[in-house]
Image (cartoon, rainbow, N blue to C red):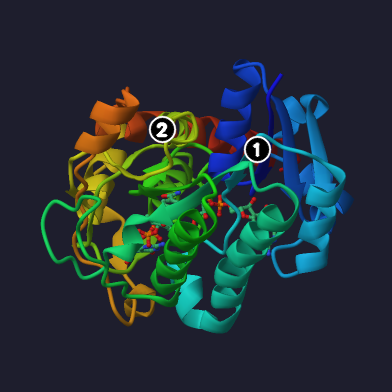
Amino acid sequence: MKRALITGITGQDGSYLAEHLLDLGYEVHGLVRRVALEDPARRFTRIEHILDRLTLHPASLESYPSIFHIFSKNKFDECYHLAAQSFVAESFADGFSTMNTNINGTHYVLAALRELSPDCRFYFAGSSEMFGKVHEVPQNENTSFHPRSPYGISKVAGFDLTRNYREAYGMYCASGILFNHESPRRGYEFVTRKITSTVARIKTGLATELYLGNLDAKRDWGHAADYVRAIYLMLQQPEPDDYVVASGETHSVREFCELAFAEVGLNYLDYVKIDPKLQRPSEVELLIGNATKAKSKLGWNPTRTFLDLIKEMVQSDLEAAMQESGRQASYQ
Ligand code: NAP
Ligand code: F7E
């Protein structure tokens, strides 16, 4: 039985990847923050249905000793390093802590593996935010980077560290350059979930308006459950490499709004308001990925369309909002 460690197992991708590896017969371990272990009801919502099949280890990306300790006590075949401060807007608010967590955290995991488990295969969660102010359209593995946020800069550094450990020490280190991927498990601060959860609350009378920033930004959005299959496949290849994972379509935030509101029979123009404070100091205006390499070398293909994604997210949030509005009605 293969053993894998997932950092960031409590997040959107970590939860889908854990399910996928369990289905494949893996023994799945997760690195979690101690505060999460102390408050499982709130912090383990995405993995509560599989908790009894996981082994969790307390550690933090800020602490090299805590990471070293896990690898000194356990041997893994594969390490999926997904943990990060992943919200771009927050990285403008506190660039220092984003850099510290994302750059040093990645370096700590790589350094501990080199010392204790150099044969363990390592995956780094790279991002389309590395392309930033894009140098070509669409973006592929050879497109140069021009990050536009502390988050993007931290991911370029993580990507470079990962490649350097591969080249300098011969370790199996691979990076995925994943474009935006979403699901009903997406954090509420990201624009897709902010939209679908507010659409559901407006429809059920729990909210009246939706404040957004830049409606004209364009993203290449896919489904997280599809993208974790690509992550897994990257660590099963004979040689480590880097891969773009994307849908190959681009849509604006405005278009996402239009379709999400239409899903419940509403017109977004009646509810969406602009709050300039939600605009970023330097925006990534357009992303669209070319995943030809992942398709041809990994045999990966996405299974859900943009519209499938919106429908699933709106339906899931609608069910939650209906339960909440039912609870509120019964209190009155
Ligand atoms: P997410 O839902 O925000 O999950 C982030 C995970 O990182 C959580 O489990 C979080 O733990 C953990 N974490 C954060 N800071 C930590 C720390 N200091 N120590 C230990 N754990 C820490 O992110 P996601 O959407 O699943 O994304 C997974 C990875 O892919 C991230 O590295 C992200 O930057 C990258 N990525 C995401 C996308 C996307 O569209 N989703 C695209 C490209 C790349 P807590 O639960 O304790 O907070
Ligand atoms: O923003 C615009 C915003 O925060 C998308 C992370 O997973 O994907 C994600 O980063 C777009 C931006 O995601 C609001 O300005 C407008 O242009 O959902 P987002 P992101 O910044 O693209 C990449 C690939 C990652 O790697 C990251 O970890 O939407 N936008 N109005 C807004 N965004 C938010 N959050 N909130 C708004 O009100």
Circle number at residue 261: none
Disc 1 residue type (three-letter): Arg
The mark lying in front, picked from 2 and 1, is: 2
Q: Which element type, helix, strand or loop, lies under badge 1?
A: loop
| Earlier sequence position, callout 2 versus callout 1 | 1
Q: Where is residue 248 shown, x and y percent of the image?
A: 19, 40
Return the residue nearer the eye: 313 or 327.
313
The image quadrant that residue 245 belongs to is top left
| Residue occupying image coordinates x 82% and y 65% | 65
Disc 1 within 8 angstroms of ligand 1 (CB): yes
**Nearest to the observer: residue 141 or residue 99:** 141
For residue 54, say whether it is visible: yes
**Label 2 with label 1: CB-CB less than 8 Å:** no
Taking 230 as reference, is 205 above or below it? below
Residue 317, position in %: x, y? 50, 37
- Residue closest to the eye, 316 or 77: 77
Q: Is residue 241 left or right of residue 228?
A: left
- What residue sits 42% from the left and 65% below the top? 160
User: Can you give x and y, in whole percent of width and height, for residue 166 in the image?
Assistant: 48, 54
* Amino acid residing under circle 2: Ala
| 234 left or right, relative to 299 | right
Residue receiving disc 2: 230
**What residue does disc 1 label?**
46
Position of 232 relative to 299 (above/below): below
